[in-house]
Amino acid sequence: MTGSSAQPAAARPRTVVCVKVDTLGDLVLFIPALAALRGAWPDTRIAVVIRQAYLDLAPQLVAGVEWIGTSLDPFARGPAADPAELTRLRHVVAALQPDVIAAATSRQNWLETVLAATPGASHRVALGTATDDEFFATQLRVHLGIDARQAFTSHAEFAADDSDWVRGLRLADALLGRAVPRSRPSLSLPAEVVSRPAAFLQQHRLSPGRYVVCAAAGFANVALKTWPAERFAAVLRHIQERHGRPTLLVGQESERPHLEPLAAAAGGDTTLWLGRDGSLPELAALIGQAGLFLGNDTGAMHLAAALDVPVVAVFGGGTWPRFVPAARRHVSVVQPLPCFGCGWDCAFGDAPCIDGISVADVTAAVDLAFARGRTDFAEIRAVEPLPATTREIMGKAAIRYRQARTDHLARQHKLEELTDLDREKDAAIAEKEASIAEKEAAIAEKEAAINGKEEAILKTEAELRQKEASIFEKEAEIHSKDHEIAALKQVCDEREKLIFELDRNSRAFEAKAVTIAADKELLVKTLRELPEDRAYAVETIAGQAAHIRNLESIRLLRDGEIADLKASLANMTNGRQDLEQARHYGRLLAEKEAVIQDLHRNCQAREAVIRQLMAETTSVTGKLWHAWRATRVWAYERFGRPLSRWWNERLVERCWMQIGELRQYPPRPLRWDRRLPRRRPTAALPQIGIVTPSYGQARFLERTLRSVLDQQYPKLRYAVQDGGSKDASPAIIAGYAARLAAWESVPDAGQADAIARGFAKIQDALGAEDVMAWLNSDDLLAPGVLAYVGDYFARHPEVDVLYGHRIIIDEEDREIGRWIMPRHDAASLEWVDYIPQETLFWRKQAWQRVGGIDPAFQFALDWDLLARFQQAGCRMVRVPYFLAAFRVHGEQKTSSVIHTTGAEEMRRIRARFHGDQQDNTARIEEQVQRVRRRGAIATRLLELGIRW
């Protein structure tokens, strides 16, 4: 229920004091309520009590309001923490002589109650219902004698699911006696504040509206709700690499140990800004000039929302949904759990609601925010990675924890009351001891008088005896007081023990009573529900239990049989692999024997030639000819061969880029070509049809799909052909079905069959001049590559096939190598498969000319297609840009069958060009070195800025 039990204040109160000693975000969300009061009461003096740290920013929030700062934190410390500051603040508020005092925080605290007790205020309104301070109510009654339930004359109620800024407006409704317009918090900074960080932005080349500001800490109040730093770093790298935006990491100087490692991990164009006391206006100016805000649920997030900056925020469940951004454009990422509403007193200690949000969840939200641009969007993206059973367990644990916490608070308040009683006893004892000290001082004074008047005492013995008698009486009285004090102390100790014993017994009796009542109710219910034939039911249940035990025994036997079958299947698989290896090595031995026989025949022929030459050298001319040949051979061996080796070592072996090697350097952030050539108008571009074959690649599949679909190519026809995967692949593909030309998930006969099926679904829609390609489900296309390829084919109608450079990545999308390809060489293609398949594009007419993919190939199907393109006379070119990324991981086909199926298929392709010379290892090695040498030359030139 929402409503208000408050009566409106006087039509024109003279002075109003609002107490809002809360966080920065709460203060920003209170702007609409303050603005409504200021507009309705233009002549009223309005003062707001806030935390001292926010005084530098407060004048920018609402004009015409006085701001009173305090160092008190009523949520962290009690009334006795700083009596001097509390006294000062009470005097300041009393000096204002307020007509109205309004407690503006959603969770009523002791400081609001203390200030509401200021004499002279005729109207005291609190937000919410009449409640005690959850933690310090007892201290408030004990130390200051104030009862929170009696401090306010009326209350402004709100709904549990109301946002915090709406709750503030409900307080304004109650004060004004009417509903005020529901306007979101809005903040406009003056030019002087906006210009403060201009030098910093210029120094770090951050253009207003372009950079992304990230508040990854903000744990001054609640450290538990901070998303892990390494995940923020991953999202910042994604923003830089995917969207090309520089990032600005902001925080306070106290957060340096947390933010400096984060900035280093983010790398790239990440700048770190750390503020100090008094720098909140500069922080607001930095946030207000950003193109996007990314961060936790903090005051900086609410500043961004009020400054109309798009917000991507990571939320936990402590106060959800109270602080959802009051923004025109925002995406809030949250993992709903049954333990929500804990107030950040987490039952599990480590906030699983925050930890369960992955990097992919937040990068998807960032991508959505960039895709929406300046249009309005307000989306809450709920993440639900936990199974229902886990969520149920968490819900029960949270309920038990909250009950234990409530019991703990009740015991704490009881202990505080007992402590106060003990303190009163101590005060009484101290008073008695002071009285004794006074009497002892009097005795000392009298003794001094006696010592000063010894002569008078000697003269007046009667007077001395009288004084001695008086002294004896006082000593007796002192001893009597000592006995009374000891007796009182003993009584206090006994009463304290009795109180503790009674408290333990009371709790034990209450627990036992609850248990007995529950057991009784369960027994009564059970007896009522038992049928008349319960004896027969008992026998039936016993029989069913025996049957269940028999079934369990059968299941155990069946599990053993299944385990034996699995072991047998594994042995059979290993045997097949060993057989493939044996066949491969058998072929190698046969090839070696053939080479030996060939060498033997060549040696015999060479010996015959030598004998003939020896016979010919008997003449002078023959001797001169052979001397010349010998000189040439000697010169080559002496100078030519060392020079060739030196050149190959300097150019090829020392080059960091090696075609054929898949891991060339430690992982580092993926970096694409900064700029591809400009695209042509859409009407001049060809259609591009792409097929992605997939099986069991759920961990990489979505990244592959996004690399194609996020290109936004206007004439794309994209089909995905899944082989009936058992993992999450079909669900992932279905999530993008609306953007695909076709897809299905059915068993197939291998990769070649999947590619053929995929193209069969889309090739009828393609013209002869349109372009085709396939992209495996673990590889990625470079950003903007489809526009570049379409433009290139449009400008070069004579080209049938093109490919480009390759980037090699690992499982985490980190770069581990590059292949910089030389210009196309038809001779090398006859011997070596060196062209990166993921960068390959061709016209449909070339595909039709060679008859498409050959399903007989499962490993070298891309080389087979290229070989048939070349034999059909297709013109192939290599373009000098990185077009795609090839992923290296342990499950890929390349690493598992290259020595068996792969070796046999490569021999078949070489046989098309060279027949019986297909296994000429010297010729193969020569072409391999030629490709590597020309690739090294291309690498050296690219380092100089020349795309050769």
Image (tube, helix red, strand yellow):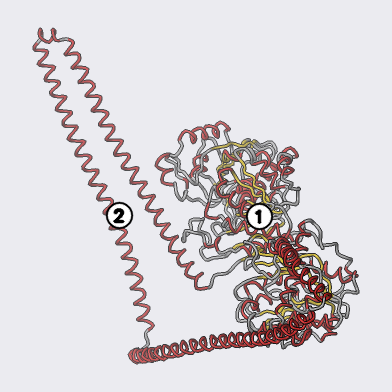
Residue drawn where x is 37% and y is 85% of the image: 530
Work out whether residue 269 can be spotted.
yes
Which quadrant of the view contains residue 283? top right
Taking depth in this image into account, of 460 and 817 the one nearest to the observer is 817
Looking at the rendered structure, the secondary structure element under dot 1 is: strand
Rendering quarter of residue 752: bottom right
Instruction: Give the residue pinned by disc 1.
Output: 294
Snapshot quadrant of residue 516:
bottom left
- The vertical placement of 547 against 342, above or below, is below
Residue at numbered disc 2: 503
Task: Tell me where residue 373 appears, x and y as whole percent.
Answer: 76, 59
Q: Are marks 1 and 2 in contact (CB under 8 Å)?
A: no
Instruction: Give the quarter of the figure containing the C terminus.
Output: bottom right
**What secondary structure is marked by label 2?**
helix
Viewer-proximal residue, 456 or 249? 249
The answer to which of 83 and 536 lies nearer the viewer is 83
Marks 1 and 2 sit apart, C-alpha to C-alpha, by 51 Å
